[in-house]
Image (spheres, rainbow, N blue to C red):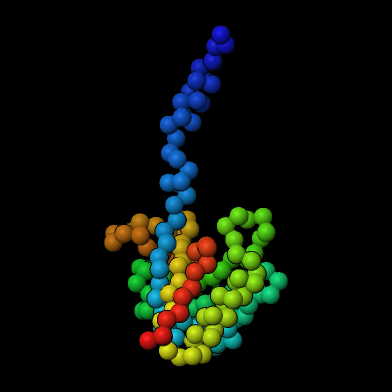
Amino acid sequence: MRKLSAAALVATSVLAFAPSPASAEEVPAWTITLRPADFVIGPALARLHTRRAWAAGFDEQLGGFEIALRKKAITIPAPSCNMDFLILKIPFYYPETPKQASVSERRAIFDRFAAFQAGGKGLLTARVEAPAPLARTGPRGVELAACNLYFAFPLTVQVTAQ
């Protein structure tokens, strides 16, 4: 029978009682409901009076885009965000990343937001998240540590008439 060294025994014990990866990877997520006036998308982003340089269109090659969400329309606390908007972003497409949506799926989401806003009525629902270190636990629960949110995958956006 093979004997384990003291270091190997300690390492085995640490690995056996380590927290599960699922709990360490838990990302705060919310479902947001928007009206057409609650956000800014596309070329209108360039006309916002903020210090931030917004990505005002859809990146056809990498599938990235941004949406400015009016903070007063969102119930997610963001005490460290010093502007009137939260940044809802879809990260660039990297084929090797498993938690993904294709560029065409991303384009469909961008187009759905733009069409919804142009229509001027109804409600839009989307799932968003704030991966570490963009979220933290504050005095009232989970809050944003900055102004940033990301679309949650799989992408889900629903529009309902009102």
> Residue placed at 58% from the left, 81% from the top?
111
**Image height of 155 relative to 20, above or below:** below
Q: Quadrant of the N terminus?
A: top right
Residue 51 seen from this side: no
Q: Quadrant of the C terminus?
A: bottom left
Residue lying farthest to the right in this orientation: 61
Residue 10 placement, left or right of 55: left
Residue 138 in the image, given as x and y percentages of width and height: 33, 59
> Residue placed at 54% from the left, 15% from the top?
4
> Residue placed at 65% from the left, 72% from the top?
104
Residue 25 in the image, given as x and y percentages of width and height: 47, 49
Q: Nearer the viewer, residue 1 or 146?
A: 1
Q: Nearer the viewer, residue 90 or 126?
A: 126
Residue 143 occupies quadrant: bottom left
Residue lying farthest to the front in this orientation: 161
Q: Nearer the viewer, residue 23 or 133?
A: 23
Q: How many marks?
A: 0
**Image height of 97 relative to 48, above or below:** above
Residue lying farthest to the left in this orientation: 140
Residue 148 placement, left or right of 65: left
Residue 162 seen from this side: yes
Residue 94 in the image, given as x and y percentages of width and height: 66, 60
Residue 30 placement, left or right of 118: left
> Residue placed at 43% from the left, 31% from the top?
17
Residue 62 occupies quadrant: bottom right
Residue 9 in the image, given as x and y percentages of width and height: 50, 20
